[in-house]
Amino acid sequence: MSKFAKKKSGELPAVSTASLPDIVFMLLFFFMTVTVMKDNTLKVKNELPQASEIKKLEKKDRVITIYVGAPDDQYASQYGSEPKIQLNDKFSNASDVGDFILMERAKKHQDLQNVLTTSLKVDRNANMGLISDIKQQLREVNALKVNYTTYEGDAFNNLKN
């Protein structure tokens, strides 16, 4: 007499799918909380220069970004081929930079308003006169912490072309 009875048929029981909706909703909530929506649509060509001494900005909530470059191909017929300034999703002049900085500063929390960094993402082919105008506007609104966004690499590669 044996203690254990052998199974009579070799069929496996059906896999329970009762927990499948829980897993699907858990994945859905995970991606909803982790996903970051794209802030701006880039309307200018933005081939960043290279630099050897770079430092990553740690806190993105303290950064105001200004893009500079020639308008993208779909906007070139309307705005020409000269480098333009993109503030959020609009093309702007250098005179609008000060108001933009003040408006963005006002949107930030009170504690962050004094530690904001202005990040300039400037195309490598943009002229320095436009950058000087932007920097002058930043000085007028007392936005003195400026960052130039670059790729890591040899700075002498910027001279090629």
Image: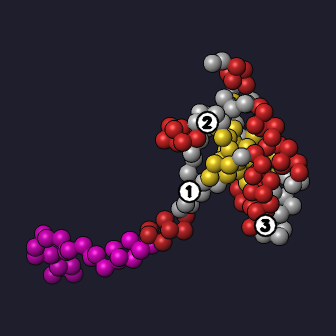
Q: Nearer the viewer, residue 88 or 144?
A: 88
**Type of amino acid under label 1:** Lys
Q: Is residue 21 magenta-colored? A: yes
Q: Nearer the viewer, residue 27 or 63?
A: 63
Residue bounds of the magenta highlight: 1-26
Q: Which mark, residue 38? A: 1
**Residue 127 horizontal side relative to residue 6, left or right:** right
Disc nearer the start of the sequence (3/2):
2
Residue on which disc 3 sits? 106
> Could you tell me which residue is drawn at 70 percent across and 19 percent down?
159
**Residue 24 horizontal side relative to residue 106, left or right:** left
Residue on which disc 2 sits? 70
Q: Are marks 3 and 2 in contact (CB under 8 Å)?
A: no
Q: CA distance from mark 1 to mark 2?
A: 21 Å
**Residue 1 horizontal side relative to residue 27, left or right:** left
Q: CA distance from mark 3 to mark 2?
A: 29 Å
**Type of amino acid under label 3:** Ala
Q: Nearer the viewer, residue 131 or 47?
A: 131
Disc nearer the start of the sequence (1/3):
1
